[in-house]
Amino acid sequence: QVQLVESGGASVQAGGSLRLSCATSGRTFHTYAMGWFRQAPAKERESIAVINWKGSRTYYADSVEGRFTISRDNAENMVYLQMNSLKPEDTAVYYCAASGNLLPTISNEYAYWGQGTQVTVSS
């Protein structure tokens, strides 16, 4: 069992930066790939960044490539999402999730989810 708790969401102006954190519990955290998803009002949940268990491979959605960076600290059971050059279209609830697959990019590959943290970007 893995429990996930996101933090770091806030309201910022366009062009600003935020770092989201995902604290995890469970002795097997280091065996899971971790992903960040987001869901804007009236839109489907989308995968935006994924990192494999070792931290050696990552995936980014085109919409965030070059602006967002996913990282993990297996010793601290933490996952991070550094978000730079934020845009109003980045406004959404952001979720972290854990998967036993290698580099999963779709939501149904993930078994564990956090409760989400709100990011609002104003123009």
Image (cartoon, grey):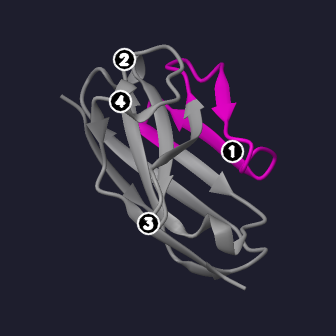
In which quarter of the view is residue 1 placed?
top left
The CA distance from mark 1 to mark 2 is 21 Å
Q: Nearer the viewer, residue 60 or 72?
A: 60
Q: Which mark is residue 108?
A: 4
The x and y percentages for residue 119 are 52, 70
Using the image, tell me which numbered label, if any, was put on residue 42. 3
Q: CA distance from mark 4 to mark 2?
A: 11 Å
Name the residue type under label 3.
Answer: Ala
Q: Which residues are magenta?
A: 51-79
Q: Which mark lies nearer to you, 4 or 1?
A: 4
In front: mark 3 or mark 1? 3
Q: Are marks 3 and 2 in contact (CB under 8 Å)?
A: no
Amino acid tagged 2: Gly
Q: Which mark is residue 33?
A: none
In the rendered structure, does residue 69 fall within the stretch colored magenta?
Answer: yes
Residues marked 3 and 4 touching at CB (< 8 Å): no
CB within 8 Å, label 3 to label 1: no
How far apart are the two marked residues, 4 and 1, measured between alpha carbons?
22 Å
The residue carrying pointer 2 sits among few (fewer than 14), some (14 to 19) or many (20 or more) residues within 10 Å by Cα, namely some
For the residues labelled 4 and 1, say whether their Cβ atoms are less than 8 Å apart: no
Q: Residue at x 24, y 30 (%)?
A: 26
Q: Give the image quarter of residue 122.
A: bottom right
Q: Mark 1 belongs to which amino acid?
A: Thr
- Mark 3 or 2: in front is 3
Mark 3 or 2, nearer chain start: 3
Task: From the image, tell me which residue sits under label 1.
Answer: 69
Residue beneath disc 2: 100
- As drawn, is 42 to the left or to the right of 5? right
Compared with 51, 39 (above or below) is: below
Is tag 3's residue or tag 4's residue first in the polypeptide sequence?
A: 3
**Rendered residue at 28%/35% (across/down):** 112
